[in-house]
Image: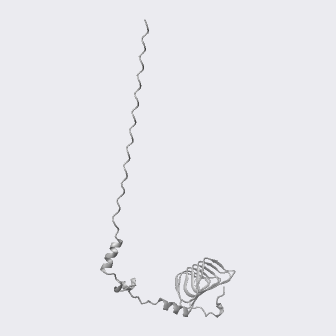
Amino acid sequence: MKVAHRVYDRTPDPETTVGENVVIKGELRFQRLLKIEGTFEGTLISEGDIVVAPSGVVRGPITNMRYARIEGTVAGDIDVDECEVLGDATVTGDISCKSLRLDPTAVLVGNVSVKRPIEPEAKAEVDAKVDTPEVTTPTAADAKGFDSKDEPSDKEYKAAAKTEAPGPAPEPAMKPEPEPEPEPEPEPEPEPEPEPEPEPE
């Protein structure tokens, strides 16, 4: 990743330094540059720069600053414009910045988010697009696409009503009644048997 490098030797002398054998807990405010060679635990409030020396330890977030150079140990999130994690530095937390330099020997336990800076021309274009547009309320005629001359007359309304009105439903057809079955013919009566003749005496 190609980033703009800042040479540490060219940075001005820090206005505040936490010595190597010093331990500070709480809230620390500074304006320009803070160098930590000892241990700091708490909240840092500044819009300037911070340098954590190889012997330095920071337990807490480093946010809203322009530049952070980490050569020691940081346990907390880092949110700055430019960040360098160099040498044998160890960062436990997420890094969010516009420019990042991370040495192969450094240790990072967390996520990295590199934000792309917005160019002035692009920012002006975005601001122009955000302007509130002019809003007009269309009339009912404009929304339907016709004027009052196109409105149908009363006769056309009645004709359309007659055409569209459904007629009465047709009556169902009558089913024919079934024909009666013919009665069966009577069976013929059996003929009487002849009487036997009397035997002769």
Considering depth in this image, is 36 or 48 the residue closer to the camera?
A: 48
- Toward the left, the furthest residue is 154
Left or right: residue 170 versus residue 81 is left
Scheme of colours in the image: one colour
Considering depth in this image, is 124 or 42 the residue closer to the camera?
A: 124
Residue 39 x/y as whole percent:
59, 81
| Quadrant in the picture for the N terminus | bottom right
- Quarter where residue 162 is shown: bottom left
| Quadrant in the picture for the C terminus | top left
Query: Which residue is found at the position 52% from the left and 92% from the top?
Result: 125
Residue 86 x/y as whole percent:
66, 84
- Quarter where residue 52 is shown: bottom right
Residue 101 x/y as whole percent:
65, 85
- Toward the right, the furthest residue is 105
Query: Which residue is found at the position 32% from the left and 77% from the top?
Result: 157
- Quarter where residue 105 is shown: bottom right
Residue 68 x/y as whole percent:
60, 86
Q: How many marks?
A: 0
The vertical placement of 61 against 173, above or below, is below
Query: Which residue is found at the position 31% from the left and 79% from the top?
Result: 155
The vertical placement of 153 against 195, above or below, is below
- Toward the top, the furthest residue is 201
Considering depth in this image, is 157 or 120 the residue closer to the camera?
A: 157
Left or right: residue 163 versus residue 68 is left
Query: Which residue is found at the position 49% from the left and 92% from the top?
Result: 128
Considering depth in this image, is 18 or 171 the residue closer to the camera?
A: 171
